[in-house]
Amino acid sequence: MRDGGKGYDPATAVLIAALCAASAALLLVDGAKGDEDEFPTLLINGFTATHAAGSPSPFEPVLYAPNRAFAFGFLRVGPGSLDLAVVHLPSSLPLWRATPARLGDWVPPRHALLRHHPRPHHRRRPGTTTVLWQTLNAAGDTVALLNSSNLVVRRYSKPLPAWQSFDHPGDTLVAGQNFTAASPPLISSNRRFALQLGASSMALHMELYGGRARSPAYWRHTALEEPPAGNATKAPVYGRLDGRGFFGMYLDGDDGERRVDVLSFDTFAEANLAGAFFRRMTLDDDGNLRAYYWADGGGQSTKAWTAEYEAISGPCGLPTACGAYGLCVLGDEAQCQCLTTPCHAGEEETTDLCDLAGGQHVAEFDVVRRTRVTVAYKEQLPPFATNTTAAACEAACAGNCRCWGALYSGASGYCYLIDFPVETMVYDADDAKVGYFKVRKVQSQTRRGMAPGAKAATTAVLALVLVSLVAAGAYMGYRMWERKEEAA
Ligand SMILES: *[C@@H]1O[C@H](CO)[C@@H](O)[C@H](O)[C@H]1NC(C)=O
Ligand SMILES: *[C@@H]1O[C@H](CO)[C@@H](O)[C@H](O)[C@H]1NC(C)=O
Ligand SMILES: *[C@@H]1O[C@H](CO)[C@@H](O)[C@H](O)[C@H]1NC(C)=O
Ligand SMILES: *[C@@H]1O[C@H](CO)[C@@H](O)[C@H](O)[C@H]1NC(C)=O
């Protein structure tokens, strides 16, 4: 950012000028003390920074938290993509990212605070610069990064932030961050898993068909204390990672916040560690929800993230441990086998088997039957029938194009239908546990679906903008504030 004013090529300078004229932005950086210039802690409306394409470090900070543990800036991801990110500086880990794949944040541009100009070899005309990301429905005058890593946009006159990154988590929650029913779900960075909050529980879900279809749950945690029953307007629980080493679930009542559940981490009892560690909770790409701490400073500092909690223990408990149509076999070490021959593991289904009306099978499929098979998240599948036979269980699935598989347990007579593409099953040494699976026939010229998010990530990102909305209004507000300050 220190070079921000020098590095423009003429085309970009023109572009910024045009942008400024259109949005009445002004360029100002908090620079009260000369020493602080190197570590700005406040950005003011109209602030502009340019990403230096040739910089050796993938992360280019433009804004620091006062405790200097976190910074906000440009993060290069691979050769062609750029994010805005809040990074934990000791570990270089991005805690929050304004990724273009977050479709909900895409709205037309109005007003730029931070921008990235095209790299020469992209050969796009400067006029085609597009906004990569901006805050939604938030008007602000300043941007600051708090000691908690929360990025906040504020109006000068308002004590509450107009927008804060804590309300828009990606795959990670940090201490002090409320995860509420209004928050978007936590999404793993590969976008295959989501953590969602219900009225009195939280659950991990598989995101299928790029999130277009129902997301089946594979793990659920219900608050010990239920919200008071019989009140239709009752507030749902919300969760918050506590710096002391637990994830609490809370209810707001008349007498303030009430804790209704605690998921405690391994280090919870070691009270002397409170506050010494920086903690995060991340939905990892394998679908597990884990808490980690980073011990910084002190002689015994680990200088690494140490896991202190995981929602699902054991590799076979993870929903896609062995890929699609995989079979996870627990032994001294977990082993992956295949339900089908040849093995389909790793191939993700992108559509279902039904016609558009949803009544008939359109895709051709083979049938695979296996004994000694079950699924790790059976409790999350609603039982289709509880006192039935293997044949009836299979028939219920065979005739339903939404069904990809049926699991029957001879001991209990329970039948479970899998109404989503079959993922990893688990070996269970019980001959009465039988499975029926549909395997789509591979067409010779099958077009492979693009992994969700891949398009957005590979599209050359030409402009990166953190936007403060209400362009002219915000500017006028600032001018008036400035005049008042001058007059005072
Ligand atoms: C943030 O951290 C800095 C340095 O540790 C400290 O001086 C400052 O008081 C903290 N700010 C708040 C609001 O806690
Ligand atoms: C989290 O929620 C509590 C209780 O509603 C509130 O007091 C606190 O300010 C919230 N924290 C943030 C960062 O929004
Ligand atoms: C239901 O909840 C609302 C909001 O929390 C509260 O104002 C109301 O008194 C509750 N009603 C009953 C019958 O508990
Ligand atoms: C289960 O089904 C069998 C045979 O249809 C029947 O005799 C039995 O009463 C059923 N049991 C229950 C608990 O419904």
Image (spheres, rainbow, N blue to C red):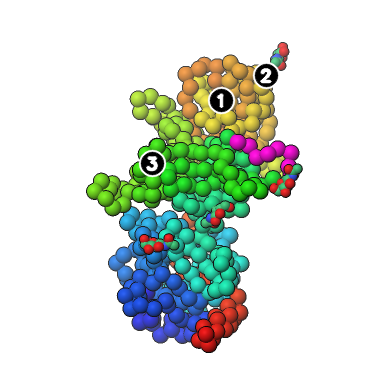
Look at discs 2 and 3 and give the one toward the viewer. Answer: 3
Q: Is residue 62 left or right of residue 363?
A: left
Report helix, strand or loop for mark 3: helix
The disc, 1 or 3, on the residue closer to the chain's N-terminal end is 3
Residue 42, quarter of picture: bottom left
Q: Is residue 275 left or right of residue 380?
A: left
Provide residue 380's location: percent of width, then percent of height. 59, 33
Which labelled disc corresponds to residue 387? 2
Q: Residues within 10 Å of mark 2 (few under 14, many from 20)?
A: few
Looking at the image, the residue that sits furthest to the left is 299
The disc, 1 or 2, on the residue closer to the chain's N-terminal end is 2
- The residue indicated by pointer 1 is 435
Look at discs 1 and 2 and give the one toward the viewer. Answer: 2
Residue drawn at the location 38% of the way across and 29% of the way down: 334
Specify the amino acid type for callout 1.
Answer: Gly
Provide residue 71's location: percent of width, then percent of height. 39, 63
The magenta stretch spans which residues? 225-232
Disc 3 beta carbon < 8 A from ligand 1? no
Provide residue 465's location: percent of width, then percent of height. 49, 71
Distance Cα–Cα, label 1 vs label 3: 48 Å
Front-most of 93 and 199? Answer: 199
Provide residue 119's location: percent of width, then percent of height. 39, 73
Disc 2 beta carbon < 8 A from ligand 4? yes
Specify the amino acid type for callout 2.
Answer: Asn
409 up-or-down from 210: above or below:
above
Residue 12, quarter of picture: bottom left
Residue drawn at the location 47% of the way across and 60% of the way down: 150
